[in-house]
Amino acid sequence: MAKALRQPNNESLTAAKAVLAIVAIVFGVHLLLSAAFHSLGGPRDPIVAALLSAVLLALLIAPPVYWLVLRPLRTEYERRREAERVGASMTHLALTDTLTRILNRRGITVSLLDAMAQAERYNTPLSIAMADIDHFKRVNDTQGHEAGDRILAQVASVLSETLRMPDKIGRYGGEEFLAVFPHTTLAQARKIAERMRGAVQKAEVAAGGSARVTISIGVTQFQRGEDLEQLLSRVDKALYQAKSGGRNLVAAQRASRDSEADAS
């Protein structure tokens, strides 16, 4: 605590010393120039003498001003820029899944919470989708975890390419991906999810032999006033509906109690 309190005082003292040093240098150089003009018989015109004195004064004090003030400020600026760059890099690593190179569970959750706050504040639509790779455990059991990791990375790449600019996607669980669609209604989100499902089905991601990887997707829309747990619970129900309906499907779950989930 004492060290933190002393830091600003030390910086202020250093700045004060630099200012005093500059004042002393300017005063000293001015005296030297005045004496030189007087002894050498400088220009008689006072305007010319003042201009010449100002030019010489600027040339003489520029180096010490640079070394005492500008150079330390530039060094401090570069140090802070480097610290900000390192901090941003560390934040990116902390929110990124190392295998798929998309957001991890923490990163996509932060993005979702931010989107929920924006939707709540400005009363704009927000939808989310939970995608799960079909029969992924079978792939791990028969082909090994290396093959499973390769499939996860390829599916993540395909899903990322199908999203729009404002959308976010992250690896939420082992083989689950959570997508966030700002300013998007349930009907619009369902179309995007169907595009995601079709893209994975068409991609050449092999699940072993001639079998191709497919995904099931649950979609729902955020309702004002609900919390994160309620929203994720509803999208989980939609995903379960897609799984139980035969997989490789998109199911939409509405918030109203009297409406049932529908799959396509």
Image (cartoon, grey):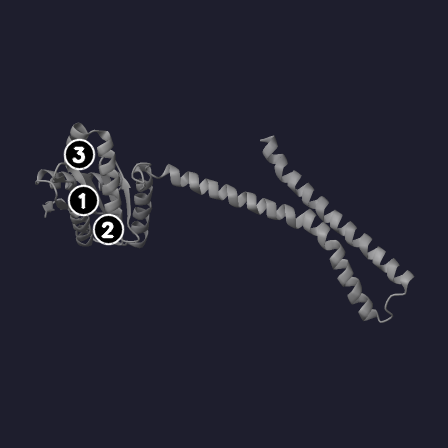
Q: CA distance from mark 3 to mark 2?
A: 21 Å
Left or right: residue 100 compared with residue 20: left
Residue ID for mark 2: 162
Question: What residue is rendered at 29% in x and 39% in y?
Answer: 100
Q: Position of residue 208 (x, y in %)?
A: 15, 35
Nearest-to-viewer mark from 1 and 3: 1
Query: What percent of the width, then of the height, locates residue 4?
Result: 59, 34
Q: Which mark is residue 204?
A: 1
Q: Are marks 3 and 2 in contact (CB under 8 Å)?
A: no
| Residue type, numbered disc 1 | Glu
| Frontmost residue, 248 versus 139 | 139
In the image, is residue 65 above or below residue 130?
below
Residue 139 figure quarter: top left
Name the residue tied to disc 3: 136
- For the question of whether residue 236 can be seen, the reply is no
What is the spatial separation of the Cα atoms under label 1 and label 3, in whole angstroms?
A: 16 Å
Q: Residues within 10 Å of mark 2 (few under 14, many from 20)?
A: some
Name the side, left or right, on which 144 lies relative to 86.
left
